[in-house]
């Protein structure tokens, strides 16, 4: 039941986002609206693929060094 509710909420959110981009923000240029929506989808997909390909155990080294280095560097940069 909870998964069905969350899926319907996401569907409603995406429908409203597409409607807003097509009818309000870029009503005169539908090609630009389509490119913006596609760019959002690409960015979300890229972030999800990075999240789900991250190793879950210490012996897996796929991308782990880059993420840990970047994480520590940015932490020192912003909070150091």
Image (cartoon, rainbow, N blue to C red):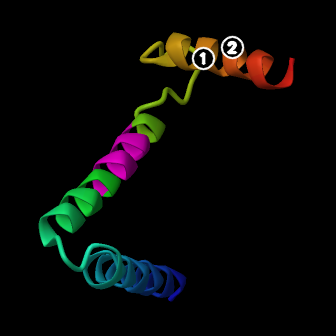
For numbered disc 2, what is the local secondary structure? helix
- Please give left or right for residue 78 compared with residue 8 in the image: right
- Please give left or right for residue 80 compared with residue 17 in the image: right
Classify 56 as above or below 49: above
Report the span colored magenta: 41-49
Across and down, in percent, residue 22 comes to 25, 78
- Please give left or right for residue 16 compared with residue 26 in the image: right
Along the viewing direction, whichever of 60 and 69 lies nearer the viewer: 69
Q: Main secondary structure of the magenta part?
A: helix
Classify 46 as above or below 21: above
Residue sitting at x 23%, y 67%: 33
Residue sitting at x 19%, y 77%: 28
Task: Say if mark 2 contacts mark 1, CB within 8 Å.
Answer: yes
Query: Which residue is farthest left?
Result: 31
Across and down, in percent, residue 2 comes to 54, 84
Q: Which residue is mark 1?
A: 70
Classify 14 as above or below 8: above
Query: Which residue is farthest front?
Result: 28
Report crowding for label 2: few under 14, some 14 to 19, many 20 or more residues within 10 A (C-alpha): few
Residue sitting at x 41%, y 46%: 48
Q: Which residue is mark 2?
A: 73
Q: Quadrant of the C terminus?
A: top right
Across and down, in percent, residue 37 comes to 27, 62
Classify 49 as above or below 19: above
Q: CA distance from mark 2 to mark 1?
A: 5 Å
Does residue 78 show up magenta in the picture?
Answer: no
């Amino acid at each position: 039941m909870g998964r069905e509710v969350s899926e319907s909420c996401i569907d409603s959110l995406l429908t409203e986002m597409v409607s807003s981009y097509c009818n309000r923000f870029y009503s005169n240029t539908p090609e630009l609206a389509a490119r913006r929506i596609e760019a959002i989808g690409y960015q979300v997909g890229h972030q999800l693929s990075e999240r789900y390909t991250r190793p879950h155990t210490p012996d897996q080294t796929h991308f782990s060094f880059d993420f840990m280095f970047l994480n520590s560097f940015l932490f020192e940069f912003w909070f150091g």
